[in-house]
Amino acid sequence: MLDLSLEIKRKDGASETHIVYPDSQIDFETKFGVSIVGAFSAGEAPKMTHLYYLAWLAEKNAGKVVKPFDEWKKDIAGVTNVDTSGN
């Protein structure tokens, strides 16, 4: 399993962090036909579509009521990976 948390920053200044659980990881791989490990491997810059879609999935699969992706992304200022390793 890939340990990944994403901070979602909204244009209104609000932000929240979501863990990317296996349900979101599997949904991502099904949607894009690419391994999540390959899409987010160290030293590689991920496609923004991949990053934002994964953040949307993580928020949605956490039980939040979210807009469809194309509407949701209009309210987003940025998404960043959160280091949860403690380093």
Image: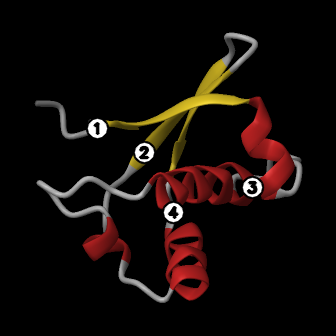
Relative to 63, is 21 on the left or the right? left
Query: With respect to residue 56, does 72 lie above or below?
Result: above
Distance between mark 3 and mark 2 Cα atoms: 14 Å
Q: Which residue is mark 1?
A: 84
Q: Nearer the viewer, mark 1 or mark 3?
A: 3
Q: Position of residue 28 (x, y in %)?
A: 55, 74
* Amino acid beneath label 2: Ser
* Amino acid beneath label 3: Lys
> Dot 1: few (<14), some (14–19), or many (≥20) neighbours within 10 Å?
few
Distance between mark 4 and mark 1 Cα atoms: 14 Å
- Marks 4 and 2, the one that precedes in the sequence: 2
Q: Position of residue 9 (x, y in %)?
A: 60, 25
Q: Which mark, residue 60?
A: 3
Query: With respect to residue 28, does 16 lie above or below?
Result: above
The quadrant of the picture occupied by the N terminus is: bottom left
Q: Position of residue 75 (x, y in %)?
A: 77, 31
